[in-house]
Amino acid sequence: MRNLTMSDRWIAAAVQMNAGEDKEVNLQTAERLIAEAAAQGARLVVLPELFNYLGRLEDLAEHAESLDGPTATRMRQAAQKHEIFLVAGSFAELRQGDDRVSNTSLLFDPQGKQLGLYRKMHLFDIDLPDVHVHESKYVAPGDLPSVCPTELGGLAQAICYDLRFPELPRSLNLREVACLALPAAFTAKTGAAHWEVLIRARAIENQLFVIAANQFGRYVSGIQSYGHSLIVDPWGTVLAEASGDAEEIITAEISLDKLREVRQHMPTLGHRRI
């Protein structure tokens, strides 16, 4: 990792929500949970995917906002108020000249400055017997990764279905990355089978912390979110896990000493051939 002036030990929080169609209620809930996480000592707080509006995909455009809209503004203010780094989950971002939206995650620093912007690259188009989702019909894919150097270490961003694509973190300069923030609305059907194993795999193979904030509960389209938000260390150890059916804040200590120890004792990043 680059020789930055960094805090070697700090607290991360993943916020688990059951967002619905009432944007104001969702934003107030997010602000309350951010305040609670900060009061617990969190220096980085991660919200879930589509935390400000989780409803029918066909209605996303109606609720989309610009990067300086009310959702981004209120999250910027929350980061500044509580003096934290905040991954503002994701929200539907307006696109010029396109009927589709972007599924966009912003990272703010404790001064309220926007450091990172990531638009979801991999879109959830599946047909299972009881889950039918075609995200790409309503959401345009992003094309750029996001890694931001901070005093907490390098922070990378991904969103939900990106978890299934190891190429995304592998495309980064992993020596510069300490944590991967993963806002999600992972479904109960796929989550029960794959959520934990994929998060632990991404943490182990890339030797980084993964802070995964998931939605829980059923939302308007009838899809059930899995919950079970997780914080996992570079050895694959689960440091904190939420339940599957409750609003919850989970926290864990992020130790950059642990990160360096894992990378020193198992130097796989230096052994890569491709």
Image (tube, grey):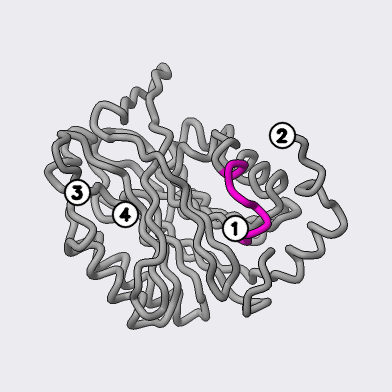
Q: Earlier in the sequence, mark 4 or mark 2?
A: 4
Locate the N terminus by quadrant.
bottom right
Q: What is the distance, in whole Å, between disc 3 and disc 2 at their CAs?
A: 44 Å
- Residue identifier under label 1: 231
Q: Say which amino acid is labelled 4.
A: Phe
Quarter of the image for residue 186 reads top left
Say which residue appears at 25% left-offset and 26% top-offset. 137
- Residue identifier under label 3: 21
Say which residue appears at 77% left-offset and 36% top-offset. 273
Quarter of the image for residue 232 reads bottom right
Q: Say which amino acid is labelled 3.
A: Glu
* Within-10-Å neighbours for mark 1: few <14, some 14–19, many 20+: many
User: Residue 4: horizontal and vertical position, in percent?
Assistant: 63, 74
CB contact under 8 Å: marks 4 and 1: no
- Residue identifier under label 4: 51
**131 in relation to 213, above or below:** above
